[in-house]
Amino acid sequence: MTAYKHLGFEVQDHVATLTLNNPSARNALSSDMRLEIEDAMTRIRKDDQVRAVILTGAEGHFCAGGDIRNMSTSPRDPATWRQSMSRLHDNLMPLMTLDRPLIAAVDGVAYGAGFSFALMADFVLATPRARFCMSFLRIGLVPDCAAFHTLPRIVGVQRAKELMLSAREVKADEALQLGIVMELHAPEQLMARAQALGASMAHASPVAVSLIKRTLATVGGADLSGLLEMEATAQGVAGSTDAHRQAVQRFLNKEPAAFQWPQKV
């Protein structure tokens, strides 16, 4: 089996487990990790013996989002940003359109693209210490990795606006109430529960499972491809602004973000 640098990959009892593995950066999504996810998912889709996939993170965190340190050196023109987003979509499309159940096992932070990754899953399991955040606006960007498609379908448009425009943190118990998380489990029980759910799918009709997922994807009339095109264009514009550049510099300087959602009194 291929060994990846930033991605754990194993198959047990017809369940493939992908572990985002960049713990020094809380498993932030790097370009190498994106390519490894695409390669692993391509292999999974060709393997009929894999009946479910678990996505999780190493060493107490799910995913902190994109690697902001790399953003400080990225080209600033909209066309280059848009091309980068299109490559990201190509990397992740096998995960977004998987015809088998995808289970996210979330511990610790799921920020930015990490939150978007969790939303791609059919079932989200989390620990009480899990924290979710659409943090994009804090660095002058728009949500990506299909969040415009997934989040409103789960929480409704009004709540999606609030979560995207506030960039506030959602703790595990609230995420459960909002329907983002399906079940909460103690950290030591999280992976066992995810594995049990995945293994159970080995006894379900793979054709019926695929048809259920494909049919549900059309509910609401949302066009994933169209939304991804809009997302890429919007991120290209947002990423080329001074507001984004200044927000990234504040982050690198360990300064508070200029944009702060007010706390409830």
Image (cartoon, grey):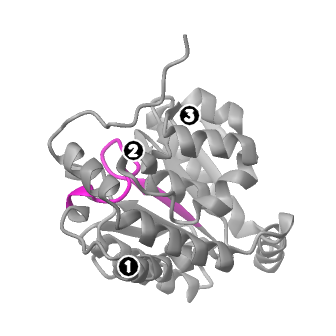
Mark 1 residue element: helix
On the question of residue 118 being in view, the answer is yes
Question: Of the numbered discs in the image, which one, if any, rests on residue 138?
Answer: 2
> Disc 1 residue type?
Ser
Q: Nearer the viewer, residue 141 or 183?
A: 141
Q: Nearer the viewer, residue 240 or 216?
A: 240
**Alpha-carbon neighbours of circle 2 within 10 Å: few (<14), some, or many (≥20)?**
many
Residue 255 is covered by the magenta coloring = no
Q: Nearer the viewer, residue 209 or 214?
A: 214
> Disc 3 residue type?
His
**Alpha-carbon neighbours of circle 3 within 10 Å: few (<14), some, or many (≥20)?**
some
Mark closer to the observer (1, 3):
1
Residue at horizontal 37 percent and vertical 73 percent from the top: 34
Residue at horizontal 60 percent and vertical 55 percent from the top: 119
What residue is pinned by disc 3?
185
Residue 86 higher or lower than 165, as above or below: below
Residue 115 higher or lower than 100, as above or below: above
Q: Earlier in the sequence, mark 3 or mark 2?
A: 2
Residue at horizontal 43 percent and vertical 57 percent from the top: 141
Where residue 48 appears, x then y in whole percent?
Answer: 62, 84
Query: How far apart in space, not on screen, are marks 1 and 3 (Cα)?
Result: 36 Å
Locate the N terminus by quadrant.
bottom left
Residue 104 higher or lower than 260, as above or below: below
| Magenta span of residues | 53-69
